[in-house]
Image (spheres, rainbow, N blue to C red):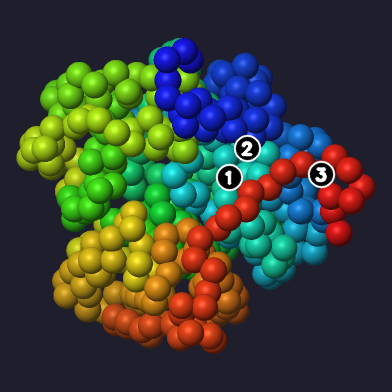
Amino acid sequence: MEGLPAPVLDALRFEKSNWAVGSVLDGPFYQCPHEAAQATPGSLLRLEKDVNTAAYLIPGGTALSRIVYQSEKLDGTPVPVSAFILWPYTARSQPDGYAVVAWAHGTSGADPDAAPSNHKNLWQHFLGPYQLALQGYVVVATDYAGLGVAKDPSGEPIMHEYLASPSQANDVIYSVKAASDAFPEISKQFVVVGHSQGGGAAWAVAQREAARPSPGYLGAIAISPYTSFLREEGKFAPLMGVAMCRGIASSMSGFDPKDILTPEGEKRVAIMFQSHAGVAAAMALFAQGDLIRADWKENPHIHQFGLLTGNGGKDLRGPLLVIHGECDPMNSPSAVREAAGKTADLFPSAQLELVWLPRVTHAPAMGASQRLWMDWIADRFGGVEVKSGYKESQLASARPATAYHKEQNWYLEAASKFYHTP
């Protein structure tokens, strides 16, 4: 789009170069199935058993499937959602089939084209889904409602309810049910793992389970989790408000984004959707300018949405492992500590563990703690009991914390020459 700053245009070009098969708006797989008009949540609506992976950058020895299934929005309205299933070559087995991990991804964007299933690297690649598959788990990964499938059965746009963690929890739970219907060889037992926005979804799954138990649920892991924008006070909090506003308007009657956005903010949000921006281009677009009112959190609809969708201070079912970097600049450690502490105070028998990573930031928390969460997953499938009550600890690094590489400085690219691969 003409007139946009160079960093925004560069990010847009890069993001679109990582689409596997062009825009989801043009792809037949992502068109809303007619069956979605009457389907109940968890219903399988479309299945692509064996995806041609030539356009993807996935590890050798893995295979890919895609599904469209029915989920529920925050208000309970049925909504069609897309997902991918990443298959290991040799899968870990439970008595009733292959072991399943439900993966909840971190923020990829708010536009339909931000669907991880249409990213060449499935969005978080070796940070999460690739490693899980390579360890023998069948990875069922929702795109979240509004990412991927763009319109409902009546032809109306599906707005992604960004940071509405209970909504994303619905997407996670129903993706597992639909995948099980599509592939009877997979186990009904599953563990949920999520990072950032997906960490918030994983936490919300544990809360959802207390009221609406799911057969086969073994526990959840929330890494660098979002808890609630009401607890966030850093520089990223206003950006959350800008990115959430249209999703909030779709679920909160009486709210209009104009209530909290400045005219420039309204303009930037419109550009985000018009340009099909993912998270990187959106961050560049929102980097400068006065986009949201200083008192935006005082808006009654915003406050109500925060209370409705926030994590912490709510009962849990099954064990929940929370892992967080002490230097996370995006989802503040203080917000996570408050959410965990409030849960422990109100529900002292909840199986909640909080593990801190000294000098670790947001995305690197995935790699820094991988041994811990991989072992935790294996223990859940192995039937190892978790004691009731709250536990808090800190991981110790093998070398001084200052010796470690701080941030990811690489990305995946297709190999086109024989010398590009080992």
Residues at marks 1 and 3, CA–CA distance in whole angstroms: 18 Å
Instruction: Name the residue beneath numbered marker 3.
Output: 415
Say if residue 202 shows up in the picture: no
**Residue 275 x %, y %:** 47, 20
**Looking at the image, which residue is at 46% across and 49% down?**
106
Tags 2 and 1 in contact by the CB under 8 Å rule? yes
Q: Earlier in the sequence, mark 3 or mark 2?
A: 2
Residue in the foreground of this view, choosing between 172 and 268:
268
**Residue 117 x %, y %:** 61, 38
On residue 123, the disc is: 1
Place residue 132 in its image quadrant: bottom right
**Looking at the image, which residue is at 32% across and 83% down?**
391
Q: Amino acid at mark 1?
A: Trp
Q: Amino acid at mark 3?
A: Ala
Instruction: Name the residue beneath numbered marker 2.
Output: 119
Discs 3/2, front: 3
Residue in the foreground of this view, choosing between 371 and 185:
371
Tag 2: Cα neighbours inside 10 Å, few (<14), some, or many (≥20)?
many
Tag 1: Cα neighbours inside 10 Å, few (<14), some, or many (≥20)?
many
Tag 3: Cα neighbours inside 10 Å, few (<14), some, or many (≥20)?
few
Check the image and report above or below for 276 versus 228. above
